[in-house]
Amino acid sequence: MTHELKTGGDRGYKRIATEEAFATREQIDGYLRLVREGKADRGVTSLWGFYAQSPSERARLVIERLLDLGERRIADMDTTGIDIAILSLTAPGVQAFEAEEAKAMVVRANDHLADAVARFPDRYVGMTSIAPQDPLWSMHEIVRGKELGFKGVMVNSHTHGEYLDAPRFDPILRACAEVDQLLYIHPQSPPDRMIGPMVEAGLDGAIFGFGVEVGLHLLRIITSGVFDRYPSLQIAVGHMGEALPFWLYRLDYMHRATVRSQRYEAIKPLKKTLFDYMRENVLITTSGMAWAPAIKFSQEVLGADRVLYAMDYPYEYEPDEVRTHDLLDISDEDKKKLMQTNAERVFKL
């Protein structure tokens, strides 16, 4: 241990953690029901068939911490020096369910989160969860979430294998742009048509599958022209951008080459380069990637204003990962942006 972790800004900044999960008992019980009835996809079966039933210490602690929005979570934040947690419903949210059940469940989850934020207004910030199965309904829930005081919108990547670049989801993108709130795309397990080789190798979850799937999702959004339609829209992804910053040179080069070749109907000319969209419309968080070389590289590629701190509680709860951020060899100004002021700007705190 190099230094004690305290809240209150003793190192020149407060720590705002931007990808912190919670769950409801109804949600987890619903996953187990889908698994029992054979209605869950392979990703939900793999992920929640483990976490919701395993007797292992890790699974037990994750479930206990997910369900707690009270004093235990606050104590965990105090222990690691986290001043504010931006909370969202854990993956895959309600996106594993049929539309009518999903809508009723997510309303209750959003109300539950709003109650928790009201109890701890100085420590919690909420993001609205939606049921993308019904995009028009979700548009209204985004507006309601803002009325509840939430500061962003959470989508857990694909919905039954469909992605937000599909035309039917346009009301969700339009609503985020109109209410001027960040859309956060969080991983879930890849859809069945992608997951097979990953499950076989035990690589379908956070170790690999999550990042591959969300990186694909974000890239589809960019290349389909979403940001040309909604130039003010801001989208965040975690885990150091799901690897896209590290691929960006090649992605941009090959995208331009593919446009020129007219090889794919889906790849059309855009108003800007992929570099531009990543630097102007995309934000990334450090959830699960407390690794100094990656953080510094991403700040260099995207700009220090586009990278935000996240812990990924409770899936990663490591005090030394907080210290890694505290000890980064970057300027004091950029460190304060990373830990505090970028989040304040993006979430309008």
Image: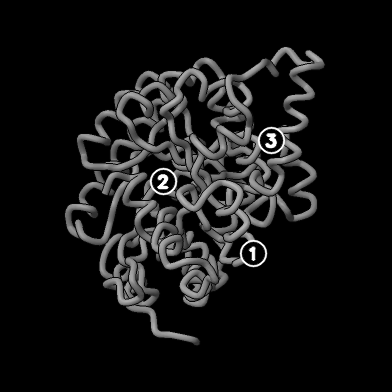
Which one is in front in this view, the residue at disc 2 or the one at disc 3? 3
- Residue shown at 56% from the left, 19% from the top: 166
Residue type at tag 1:
Pro
**Other-residue count near label 3 (Cα within 10 Å), few / some / many at <14 / 14–19 / ≥20:** few
User: How much space separates mark 1 and mark 2, taking CA atoms?
Assistant: 37 Å
Which is more N-terminal, label 3 or label 2?
2
Is residue 247 placed above or below 6 in the rendered structure?
A: above
Q: x%, y% of residue 40?
A: 58, 39
Which one is in front in this view, the residue at disc 3 or the one at disc 1? 1
- Residue shown at 61% from the left, 29% from the top: 161
Which residue does the numbered mark 3 point to in the structure image?
Answer: 192
Residue type at tag 2:
Gln
- Residue shown at 50% from the left, 36% from the top: 280
Q: Secondary structure at mark 3?
A: helix
Which residue does the numbered mark 2 point to in the structure image?
Answer: 27
Q: How is the image coloured?
A: one colour
Residue type at tag 3:
Asp
* Side of 250 relative to 273 (left or right): right
Q: Secondary structure at mark 1?
A: helix
Q: x%, y% of residue 182?
A: 39, 38
Q: x%, y% of residue 30?
A: 45, 43
Which is more N-terminal, label 1 or label 3?
3
Task: Look at the numbered discs 2 and 3 and tell me whether their residues touch, using CB distance below 8 Å.
Answer: no
Which residue does the numbered mark 1 point to in the structure image?
Answer: 293
Taking the image as drawn, is residue 33 in sight?
no
Q: Secondary structure at mark 2?
A: helix
Q: x%, y% of residue 90?
A: 45, 49
User: How much space separates mark 3 and mark 1, taking CA atoms?
Assistant: 34 Å
Which is more N-terminal, label 2 or label 1?
2
